Image: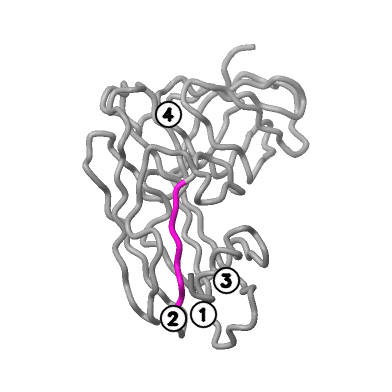
Amino acid sequence: MSSAWMRLALAILGVGLAWGARGEIVIDRTRIIYPATSEQVTVNLTNEADSPRLVQVWIDAGDPRARPEDSDVPFTVTPPILRMDAGQGQALRVAYHGAAAQSDVEQVYWLNVLGIRPAADTSHALQLAFRSRIKLFLRPPLSPGRAEAAAQGLQWRVLKDVTLQVQNPSAYHVSLASVVLGIEGRQYRNDDPPMLAPRSSAIVTLHGAPGSGPGEARVHFTTLDDHGHARNHEAPLSPQ
């Protein structure tokens, strides 16, 4: 293995890793929707840095610390390792190898793109690496309902004075971006709510939220759709 590739392998282990850096290797979307019956999905990368980058790509099942060689997922991504010159684009082919009907609910995985600047001085073993990580939603053909309708089906209720419980009865993930409870002319909010898994519930803590309040209290929330666009919604509170 060349010294440059060795530096890349060491960076993947987490030494000198920079999370969430801007620029560098840019992915053409913020999430991937993969129909389980598709042969493959194409994702495009662009090197927006001013010099070449070595790039490694892999998919994990949710552990951000999982190394590429330890990832056990029903996907392959081609090419897994590449070199990109400044301004160059590259198409990735993501292929699913699992059973199309193994589940009737949507599953989530993560696509990782790690870029590292090649070093002219080969005596150094470590280089600063920049990683991007986006969600990959595996959507089986038998999922009931429509993904775009899942947000409207959320059920909200106040548990106690600082928390809401939200129930997602759908077969799809719902990516919450913000939650606001409006009551008696005041707002109580959370700008970092959790993503809701299919057929699950979650607790959303609000800053200074009151009790259950009057019946006209409503929840205003924002979700991200399949294209990463923000969508605004409004829903009443469910009875206690």
Among the 4 quarters of the image, the one containing residue 45: bottom left
Residue appearing at x 43%, y 38% in the figure? 73
Residue 52: which disc? 2
Instruction: Check if residue 54 falls in the magenta segment.
Output: yes
Residue appearing at x 28%, y 34% in the figure? 36
For marks 3 and 4, the one nearer the N-term is 3
Residue 152: which disc? 4
Count up the numbered dots. Answer: 4
Identify the residue under disc 1.
Answer: 118
Identify the residue under disc 3.
Answer: 7
Spatial CA distance of label 4 from label 2 is 45 Å
For marks 1 and 4, the one nearer the N-term is 1
Circles 3 and 1 in contact, beta carbons < 8 Å: no
Residue 183: which disc? none
164 vs 176: above or below:
above
Q: Start and end of the magenta stretch?
A: 53-59
Residue with the most extreme top position: 240
For marks 4 and 2, the one nearer the N-term is 2
Image coordinates of residue 220 in percent, x first then y, are 55, 36
